[in-house]
Amino acid sequence: MKKLFAAILALGLIIAVSGTASAVDVKVSGSYYVAGVYDNNPSLLKDSYSRAYFFQRIRLEPVFKVAEGLTFTARMDAMEGAWDTATTAGSRSAQSVDTGRNFDWERGYVTFNTGIGKFDVGYMAAGAFGTAFSDNTTTRPRIKLTTKAGPMILVALYEKRTEGNTVAAPHYADADYDAYYLAPIYPFKGGQAGILYGYLRSAVNRSAGSSMEFHIFEPYFKATFGSVYVEGEFDYNVGKQRKSEIAGVADIDWKGYAAYLMAKTSMGPATFGAQVGWSSGDDIATANEVESGLGGGADWNPALIGMNDDLATWSGGDTNTANSAKGNILLINVFGDYKVTPKFSMGAAFTYAKQDQNTVAAQISKDLGYELDVTASYKLYDNLTYMVGAGYLWTGDALKGANPAVKVDNDYILMNKLTLSF
């Protein structure tokens, strides 16, 4: 009931402010989607079960222009989740869209121009830089400065991930998780290139005698050469996953790598290309060092079944979607699309994936499997698109771990999705 009241109050505020047109100019954009899924074997095990479900989301993104160079941006999501599932407290994957208990005013930040650049202050988009690879778009409180140095764009920001102190002895006022980033970006004709440097420090476990700190480096590029578009990214993270404050307890070092490359070209109504993504896995033989990369990220979804973030979020986290962050993986994907008419298009993709490192001793195989996907999309209106898709996954033996008695099986999925943007 409280969330329903908050939703009504928020919409009332938008209407009230937009009514004072002389003081504030309001532009509202947004989207709505609803998707239906039939998953034949989500566990990827022999003689298992199937499931069918719908999920949806409503999103509103109003921008209030208060004065020239001064705006306030918000974002609200409502009725996000699976249709009429049983609600489990704290479980987003089991979230019901029942009216009144599913409203999230997710973002709110002010933007203003100054003599040294543009500032954004508040809860805003975070977790994304460069290409979609390695991105996990979310919302966090930030202070962001964007400025220019000649042709270069410079971005500097501070991000608060956790604010806290320890309540158990020993008491610490500092038990925070903070992040600091600096990114120079160079735009050029037909593309751009840049690098993100980040320093992250987490002291949320200080009461247990440890903290974490690491550095990340993420160079990327995007470029068009005639009819060919190419983009790539390389990620490197290094630091301490456990920096011990207890005598006799060893530190745990952390270093990892990830890389991505995609190229595509168009020939008339046809577009085709290929991409490869790799994220280093942890060597289980090294106890005091973690070699995991940051992963391919939830935003990068080259396949309909394997490690698809939508399925991982709304299906309950079955075996075929548990690795939505796409760490410890080598994935190769080829794809193509054909625009049959200006409103109707068809696409296909073929994907192979394997693990970079074994996850258990004496693992039988690193093979995660092969997947074939086909899709078709039709624009009912300029802002309304209907998509149908089907995918088939030939399951690899990596899911057996070290047990040859485990029987895995293939999976197929049928889905359709209606998307409105405005």
Image (cartoon, grey):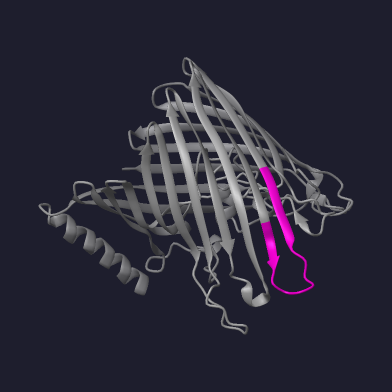
Magenta extent: 240-257
Q: Residue furthest left?
A: 22
Q: Is residue 124 above or below residue 341?
A: below
Left or right, residue 362 beside residue 149 = right
At horizontal 52% and vertical 43% (from top left) the residue drawn is 196
At horizontal 50% and vertical 55% (from top left) the residue drawn is 180
Q: Quadrant of the C terminus?
A: top left
Left or right, residue 379 beside residue 260 = left
Snapshot quadrant of residue 367: top right
Image location of residue 119, percent across then percent down: 33, 51
Image location of residue 383, percent across then percent down: 33, 37
Is 328 included in the stretch rendered in magenta? no
Snapshot quadrant of residue 19: bottom left
Q: Is residue 57 above or below residue 174?
A: above
Q: Is residue 391 above or below residue 213?
A: above
Of residues 84 and 209, the one drawn nearer to the viewer in this rendering: 209
Answer whether residue 320 is visible to the viewer in this image.
yes
State whether the magenta stretch is mostly helix, strand or loop: strand
Q: How many callouts does the rendering have?
A: 0
Image location of residue 389, percent across then percent down: 55, 37
Image location of residue 151, percent across then percent down: 39, 31
At horizontal 22% and vertical 63% (from top left) the residue drawn is 13
Is 253 included in the stretch rendered in magenta? yes
Q: Residue furthest bottom?
A: 169
Of residues 257 and 317, the one drawn nearer to the viewer in this rendering: 257
At horizontal 82% and vertical 51% (from top left) the residue drawn is 400
Of residues 203 and 261, the one drawn nearer to the viewer in this rendering: 203
